[in-house]
Image (cartoon, helix red, strand yellow):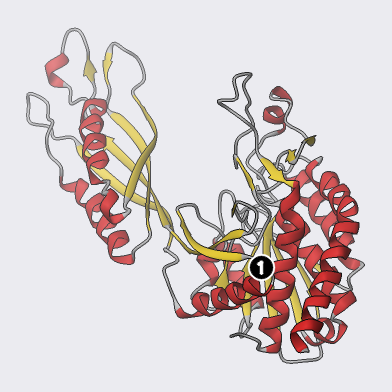
Amino acid sequence: MLEQIQAQLHEEIETYFEERLPHYLMMLKSWVDVNTFTLNVDGVNQLGAMTADAFVELGFSAEFIESEQPKYGKHLVLTRKGNGGHTIGMVSHLDTVFPALDEMMNDFRWREEGDRIYGPGTIDIKGGTIIIYMMLEALSRFAPEVYDAVTWVVLLDASEETEGEHFGRICNERLDGAQACLVFEAGYVNGNDEFKLVTQRKGMMTYRVAVEGKASHAGSDHAAGANAIVQMAEVIKRIAGFTDYERDLTFNVGTVSGGTVTNRVPHHATAWVEMRAFDMDAYHHGVRQMLALQEMETLSSNDGYQCMVLVDIHRQTKPWPKNAGTEQLYAVWRDSAESLGYQVTWQARGGLSDGNFTWENVPTIDALGPDGANVHCSERSADGSKDQEYAIRSSFVPKALLNTVAVLNLVNGNQS
């Protein structure tokens, strides 16, 4: 009898989502139409205000928090206080990676083609924020006792695409003692009923590598110089060799610069390097390898001047490994999916999310947003070899339904 009641409730929620989907997508379009490139402070803040206005209808109060770095917009925290002991956090972000000129040159905007909805942020991550809204609206309508009992905290990062440490601290402060942190990055689907949820993410570290050489005239006194660019080439070759696919440890030399003019032996060169790893041991191994580059002495001038290699750690974000808190949430989503006739599988992703900063302090699960493809891509070509970011329209309802049922089971303690 209980199963029949639950099945009927699930069907009513699904029907409600289907009927309301045009409204949700109209709201999403209004958000996608605003350029929210991370460094477009006005655009990011505009979207923050629009999002706050939308959630007022669900009883949320808004707090805007200045970023530690003035070049970024304001973080947004939306809160609805409950009368019970549960707190659940939901995380999204306001910014995208697309400058306004990029969007204009590639005619990258809201565009519906069949089941695909193209546009900047459709899945990374404005579509995820819509899923949050859908879920909360359904809970307020179909499970008001649960909705009123829980303290809901929606946290939106203003600079997730470039810097997440400050926002991560905000999340951990506001979610201290929370039952769960739910992250609404894109969630991919196999077929129609198998959802991939993220339970692990690689950590990242970025390094600035500098080589100090010795300048000289490239024509009349070439031998007196110690070429920093040539030394950097040897350093780069060494870094490329650090990648170990068996350990999921990768290094990417992203930018290189050096020298001034061609008739001068260059005395300085700089490279920026990114390292990623799932495993903490591999992560620390990579750090040791990079710092050991400072002991390299392979190139010198004819008078014995030795090039110096300097390695500075610029940014570090620890891996999100397998852990008990995430596994418990995954079990709730898995069982909830089975009750709906769906399946979920776990996925480890190489990209970062705000979940990298929360998993140690509060149980965290990720990829609760809609399905889609081509995250961070604004280009398209006639032959189809390049295509723009898009969300899959038909994924919004089942993903919102799964999250709604899973949250109900989480709060009520229903887990098989």
Q: Nearer the viewer, residue 294 or 102?
A: 102
The percent coordinates of residue 26 (x first, y second) are: 88, 47
- Left or right of 415: which side holds 396? right
Q: Quadrant of the N terminus?
A: bottom right
Q: Is residue 340 above or below residue 5?
A: above
Give me the residue at 15% from left, 42% from top: 296
Residue at label 1? 341
Give me the residue at 77% from left, 92% from top: 84
The percent coordinates of residue 212 (x first, y second) are: 25, 35
- Left or right of 212: which side holds 95? right
- Which image quadrant for residue 367? bottom right
Q: Residues within 10 Å of mark 1 (few under 14, many from 20)?
A: few
Give me the residue at 33% from left, 53% from top: 248
Q: Nearer the viewer, residue 397 or 202?
A: 397
- Left or right of 410: which side holds 232? left
Badge 1 amino acid? Gly
- Left or right of 26: which side holds 132? left
Q: Nearer the viewer, residue 274 or 408?
A: 408
The percent coordinates of residue 238 (x first, y second) are: 21, 39
- Which image quadrant for residue 142? bottom right
Q: Residue farthest to the bottom? A: 84
- Circle count: 1
Is residue 267 at least partly visible in the picture?
yes
Give me the residue at 85% from left, 58% from top: 18
Q: Is residue 155 above or below residue 309?
A: below
Q: Is residue 262 above or below residue 166?
A: above
The percent coordinates of residue 412 (x first, y second) are: 71, 88
Q: Quadrant of the C terminus?
A: bottom right
